[in-house]
């Protein structure tokens, strides 16, 4: 069934992968991106991809190309003690890849395909669902574009989400922490490990990159920069002496780096008529499990599957089915990420610790080393992983976490 014109607002990774996967089901796909540079930068320098993200790239025929640009990471290393904990079985690795490299591979793939048009410097300003039009600002002035289906892949501040949701249907939870990341090189840390330091208030982490380069990020309380980025006794090096060899150059780079906010977004509905929101537009999470993009890419695969298996169904019905399938997993990974945040920041409660231990044992019995590994190295639904934890604790599964 030829479904006419698909318009995708947002040319970030989720918008581009959606374009690649959905192209066979539409006569024309148009991707509208307000600012190509912003699509690549502004947040973490690197992204980690697990099995979910890699599977989506495999569906696009791009996994090998992305793997060639990335570095496999087998576990986490405590920066002060040097203790290494593998993420999973000996050959289980997440892939650390530069955000810019990933974006560039996806853009090239989209540009090389007939039937997809990618337009830069086009900002979606509004949606008229009655007329099925998208309103845009372009370098040549305002423009109105018709659609048969519209995907909002326009990130956490999604204009498309605003067009389908009432204010009270969106929950934004902001952490009192900010994130900054700078490049470092030849620091001598294990090239196959995520290295981290944490004291319950500030966390420093570093994923390896290509040729001895790494990203080094700091998550710290908003407003604490003047205390942290100096060599005094409240500074970063007093907290984490293992970083002191990086000297003033690191402190200057960190204080000059842009600070990004961290938080989560939940939307009560993801679709209305022929409009759907996916990726961060529909569900943003704190980055501690490294699953935000992985979850968005999994959305794109699920959406493609719904179209593949429902060739005769009306578009709005396919979109409702998609949303029903994806909302519970997205909610589950938000909860799991919040808990993992407390664990990595060193502020896990006794209940969190007990839950992780018992859930770990239960998941182990079904062949998964622990919750993190189950999320990173399998495509088991996040809500089922969460339910397995509740069962392990012999607790009643809350109604909203139950899945059919
Ligand atoms: C510090 C940090 C670290 C992270 N690390 C990881 C990680 O390791 N692994 C992981 O899986 N996830 C990670 N994430 C999450 C990940 O960055 C996001 O989940 C992912 O970028 C979402 O992709 P997206 O395409 O949905 O949205 P975005 O990447 O936000 O892309 C949206 C695109 O839409 C464009 N846009 C926005 N509004 C408009 C408009 N009105 N008109 C036209 N275009 C518009 C934007 O310019 C942008 O290009 C991290 C997030 C943060 C903050």
Image (cartoon, rainbow, N blue to C red):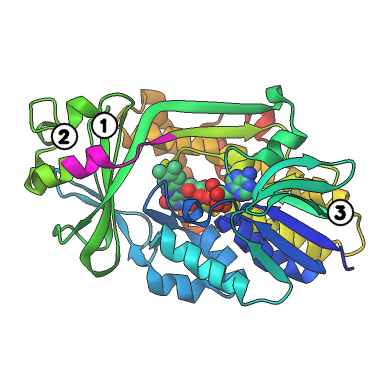
> Can residue 394 be seen here?
yes
Nearest the eye: 367 or 53: 53
Give the distance between the C-alpha atoms of the residues marked 3 and 2, in whole angstroms. 53 Å
Instruction: From the viewer's perspective, tell me whether residue 224 is left or right of residue 33.
Output: left
Give the distance between the C-alpha atoms of the residues marked 3 and 1, in whole angstroms. 47 Å
* Label 3: element kind: helix
Total numbered badges shown on the rendered structure? 3
Give the distance between the C-alpha atoms of the residues marked 2 and 1, in whole angstroms. 9 Å
Residue 273 image-quadrant placement:
top right
Q: Are marks 2 and 1 in contact (CB under 8 Å)?
A: yes
Magenta stretch contains residue 345: no
Image coords of residue 318 (percent x, y): 83, 53
Q: Quadrant of the N terminus?
A: bottom right
Write down the residue under mark 2: 236
Instruction: From the viewer's perspective, tell me whether residue 161 is left or right of residue 351.
Output: right
Marked residue nearer the N-terminal end (3 or 2): 2
Q: Are marks 3 and 1 in contact (CB under 8 Å)?
A: no
Q: What's the magenta region?
A: 252-261
Relative to 389, say whether 106 is above or below: below
| Disc 3 Cβ-to-ligand 1 distance below 8 Å | no
Marked residue nearer the N-terminal end (2 or 1): 1
Write down the residue under mark 3: 315
Nearest the eye: 353 or 234: 234
């Amino acid at each position: 069934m030829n479904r006419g014109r698909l318009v995708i607002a947002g040319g970030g990774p989720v918008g581009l992968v959606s374009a690649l996967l959905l192209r066979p089901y539409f006569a024309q796909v148009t991707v509208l991106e307000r600012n190509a540079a912003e699509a690549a930068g502004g947040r973490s320098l690197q992204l980690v991809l697990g099995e979910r993200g890699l599977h989506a790239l495999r569906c696009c025929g791009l996994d090998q190309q992305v793997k060639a640009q990335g570095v496999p990471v087998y576990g986490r290393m405590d920066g002060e003690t040097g203790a290494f904990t593998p993420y999973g079985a000996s050959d289980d690795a997440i892939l650390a890849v530069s955000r810019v490299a990933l974006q560039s591979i996806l853009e090239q793939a989209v540009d090389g395909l007939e039937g997809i048009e990618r337009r830069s410097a086009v900002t979606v300003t509004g949606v008229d669902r009655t007329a099925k039009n998208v309103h845009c600002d372009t370098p040549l002035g305002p423009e109105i574009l018709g659609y048969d289906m519209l995907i909002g892949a326009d990130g956490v501040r999604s204009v498309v989400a605003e067009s389908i949701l009432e204010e009270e249907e969106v929950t934004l939870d902001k952490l009192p922490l900010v994130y900054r990341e700078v490049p470092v090189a030849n620091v001598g840390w294990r090239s196959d490990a995520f290295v981290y330091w944490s004291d319950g208030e500030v966390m420093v982490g570093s994923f390896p990159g290509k040729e001895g380069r790494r990203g080094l990020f700091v998550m710290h309380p908003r407003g604490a920069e003047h205390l942290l980025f100096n060599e005094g006794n409240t500074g970063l090096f007093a907290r984490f002496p293992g970083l002191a060899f990086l000297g003033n150059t690191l402190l200057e780079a960190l204080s000059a780096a842009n600070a990004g906010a961290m938080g989560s977004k939940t939307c009560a509905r993801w679709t209305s008529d022929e409009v759907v929101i996916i990726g961060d537009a529909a569900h943003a999470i704190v980055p501690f499990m490294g699953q935000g993009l992985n979850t968005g890419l999994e959305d794109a695969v699920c959406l493609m599957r719904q179209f593949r298996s429902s060739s005769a169904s009306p578009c709005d019905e396919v979109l409702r089915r998609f949303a029903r399938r994806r909302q519970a997993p997205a909610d589950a990974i938000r909860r799991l990420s919040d808990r993992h945040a407390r664990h990595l920041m060193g502020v896990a409660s006794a209940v969190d610790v007990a839950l992780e231990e018992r859930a770990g044992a239960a998941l182990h019995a079904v062949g998964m080393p622990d919750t993190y590994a189950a999320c990173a190295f399998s495509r088991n639904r996040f809500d089922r992983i969460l339910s397995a934890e509740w069962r392990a604790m012999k607790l009643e599964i809350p109604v909203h976490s139950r899945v059919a």
